[in-house]
Every structure is written in C-alpha cells, then in structure tokens.
Image (cartoon, rainbow, N blue to C red):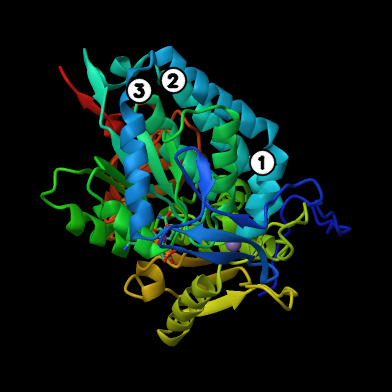
Amino acid sequence: MTPSTETRTSIVWDYAPAPESSDHIRLRGRYGLFVDGDFKDPVDGRYVPTINPATEEPIAEVAYGGPDDVAAAVESARAAHPKWAALPELERAKYLFRIARLIQERARELAVVETLDGGKPLRESRDVDIPLAAAHFFHYAGWADKLRYGVNAREVKPLGVVGQIVPWNFPLLMAAWKLAPALACGNVAILKPAETTPLTALLLAEICQEAELPAGVVTILPGDGSTGAALVRAPGVDKVAFTGSTAVGRDIQAALAGSGVRLTLELGGKSANIVFEDAALDQAVEGIVNGIFFNQGHVCCAGSRLLIQESVRDEVISKLWARMGRLRVGDPMDKNTDVGAINSAEQLARIEALVAAGEEEGAARRSIACELPERGYWFAPTLFTDVSPAHRIAVEEIFGPVVSVLTFRTQAEAIEKANNSRYGLAAGIWTDKGSKAFEVASALKAGVVWQNTYNHFDPTAAFGGYKESGFGREGGPAGLRPYLEVVR
Ligand code: NAD
Ligand code: MN
C-alpha cells in the first residue's frame, strides 16, 4: 500500500554513517563473580562468552555462578547486612548518591557497552537507559532518610538479603530499578543479570568498588536460569524480586509458596495502545512507533496491541506504514539507527515463530523493506492487520518489533477489548478529550496508563502489573514498600 498523504513533510533525508566509537571503553577480557567486594573465580561455575548480537562476535568471558557460588554470595551478604542496616540513613544515602554520580561520569562508556552487549541502538542506551539508571539511584538516595513517610508508617525496618533477577532488555536500568530501592531501605542485594547482557551490571560492580560501598552490600552474580533458580531457593534469602517471563515468574512463585520469603514479580504484557478518532493522529503515529519499535519491541510494556477506532483505521494505518518506512534498521552503534539487533538467536527464533503463526492463522503481514546486515540477529519492523482477538499474535507476547492491529467502534468496546488479556501491564490512550482519557484509564486493568504519550518512564512513578503481568510496584514511594517491613 502506498501512503496517500505524507505526514508533516515530504522531504526524505538521507544520513551519512555516524558510528559511535568504542575506543574509550575499558573492558576486561574476563569477568569473575562480584562477591564480597571483589571479582572472584567461580567455585563450581564456569566462564561463558557474552556476544554482540549485531555481529555475533564475543566481547568478553563472564563467570556463571554455580550452587556453591550462590551459597557463598548469600553468606557474604548475610555478614554484610547488620552493619549496612545500622548505618545512619544519611550515610546510606551518600553511597547511593555516589553511585548515581559515577554512573553519570561513566555514562558514555556504559551506553556503548550496553549497546555492544545487547544490540539496542546507541541513541537509546545513551539517552534513555543510562540517564534513567542514574536517575533511579538519585531518586532513592533521596528517600533513604524518609522511608517511613514513603510507606506511611511510624517505624520501618529492612528485610535483610534480597535476591534480584533481571532480564536482558534494559540490563543496567533494571539493575538500578532493583538495587536502588533495596539499598536505600537498608537491605543488601544479590543481583543476577541475564545471560546475554551481563556486562553493564559488572561495570556497576566496579562502580560499587569506586564508591567504596562496603563489601557484600551488592553482589553481582552472573549466570543462567540455573543460577537464578538456585538464588531463589537459597536459604538465607529474605526477599526475591524478579523481572522476566511469566513462565519463570510462575516457577519462582511455586518454589517460594509457603516459605515466608517475600516476592514481587514484574512479568510480561500485551499492552493495548488505543487510538480514538478525535486524537491528533500524527502525534499518535509517533506514539505507536515509540510504543512498539523502541528497543526492537523488547519491552514488557510495549504497545503491541494497537486498537484503532474504525472511522480512522485506514488513515492511521496509512500514516503508520509511511512512518515505518522511515525507520532506520541496522548497526546499533550508529547514532542514527532507530531499530537495532534482536537480542539473541533464541529471541529471534521466538519472534519468527509467532510471526509465522500470525500468517498461518490468516492475519495480513507487512514488513518494511530494509537491508539487514549479513551477520547478527535482525527482524524488520512488522505490521499485522486483519487480526482477530483469538489469534496468537493478538494474545501472546512477541517481544519483538511486531504490532498487531485490532479495531473498535465505541469506547465501551475499546475498554472491553483492551482488558481482554491475561496480562495487564500498561496501556496507551490517544484522544483530544481529557474526560474521555480519564474515564477510559479508570476502566483499564493496567498498572500504567499513558495518555497521548507512550513508554514514558520516570523514577518517581510506580510501575507494575495486574493479572499475569505480576504484582508489586517499582519506582516512586510505592517502590519502597516491597523492601521494608512496617514495624508499627
Ligand atoms: P526469562 O524469564 O527466562 O529470563 C529472565 C531472567 O530470569 C534471566 O536472568 C534468566 O537467567 C532468569 N531465569 C531463567 N530461568 C529461571 C529460573 N527457573 N529461576 C530463576 N531465574 C531464572 O526470559 P527469556 O527466556 O530471556 O525470555 C523469554 C520471554 O520472556 C520473552 O520472549 C518475553 O516474552 C519475556 N520477557 C519479558 C521480560 C519483561 O521485562 N517482562 C523480559 C525478558 C523476557
Ligand atoms: Mn551479549
């Protein structure tokens, strides 16, 4: 389909290559486990290379913790906890402020390493991931001496040792979401980064050293699912915080049932992005693009179900398809790239399987024409129309640059369709009418609802899900609650 009208301007810009250099980064060839304040060889683990998904080249070798490593990590964390918890709150805050400032100081390096290890465009790691990670530490540093106001209690105390498991889509940012509130509340933390993206967490370990954080307060324990599973089940862990797939979340919940170990889960989503006929459509199209193509769609709250009011369906789709044609897919290190590499071969296979299911079930697929590099993992931005609510691509999380379009006629139908999901993480509403946005937002079963924007993150705002998207909130004062016990 050729677009009937051009949006805003008909000038098509061409760009010269604008690669960021990686000369300035200082990576070791090999990273051990960061336990007890230092990098250590694994006791019963092994070393595994982490690769750059845009080139398939290895970047560094990283230790994977085995069961004995997990036990040693918990022992060191337990030993560190009493002193850390007893520090005056303002002293704890100082460490967090230091970490935040060191992240800012090393921002360029962290952004490059994030992009090399995970495949996301440098523009995003530089402008979103790293600044927001620093902002989370700043935010919770500010809370450290005001905890009881955050949870409306007279007296609070930390839980102890927390085990935290994060995914590969926002590696440093998710580490910050987990560590900053835990430490501010007086807990010590053991963080397990994801298999494909351990490097920025290991640089954060160096930052903890530079900040002279006492040994054992932060442990970085790279590894695979078995390391995560051992950490969850380790005696001496008081609380588990997990972000990742619903399947693993379920496994963790079953493992901890009845144990008294606290748990928060931030799982998947199939979030509805709802465009009403009275919306500013050009602006909505930008929001749709940002909602699903940001970070290759590897976003738990991605606006992967696009709900368009029937009266503007053709116009929105034509504008969207024209806009998609302008997306620059390719080298994540190029500053003009919009869509980078798919994070791993496994994730690419999952996306391909679900897209194939969409075609088999009868939806109409369009993928933009773009030249993809020969090596690495890539998927062209894709739009599905003629989608029925029962199709797998309308129900299951694809976690890739693929948007499924559904339509609605009335506001009530929009709400019903948006809520017709086993997930409930986020939603977007595009309308010119404030009252309508308010009414619809109140009726949506979603933890975050954006109005006339999408994928907008701020450390002061709570984030979390309903239903199979998990429970517990991260960010803002609500993010303190899972890391504190109210004494009275
Ligand atoms: P995953 O849930 O397997 O991995 C997330 C983290 O959990 C990783 O650190 C992993 O090592 C760890 N882990 C794996 N098995 C574990 C276990 N049994 N116990 C404890 N920890 C364990 O996710 P994935 O396989 O990388 O991705 C699969 C799908 O999950 C994706 O396609 C996407 O739909 C979804 N996902 C969602 C998010 C999110 O932010 N909500 C993030 C990543 C993936
Ligand atoms: Mn990698």
Report the mark closest to the observer, 2 or 3: 3
Visible residue check, residue 417: no
What residue would you read off at disc 2? 92
Tell me, for residue 83, which label it has, or none.
Answer: 3
Q: Which of 470 and 84 is in front in this view?
A: 84
The residue at 81%/57% (across/down) is 10
* C-alpha distance separating marks 2 and 3: 11 Å
Nearest to N terminus: mark 3 or mark 1? 3
What residue would you read off at disc 1? 127
Quadrant into which the C terminus falls: top left
Characterize the local packing of mark 3: few (<14), some (14-19) or many (20 or more) Cα atoms within 10 angstroms. few
Nearest to N terminus: mark 2 or mark 3? 3
The quadrant of the picture showing ligand 1 is bottom left
> Relative to residue 474, is residue 445 drawn left or right?
left
Quadrant into which the N terminus falls: bottom right
Of helix, strand and loop, which one carries label 2? helix
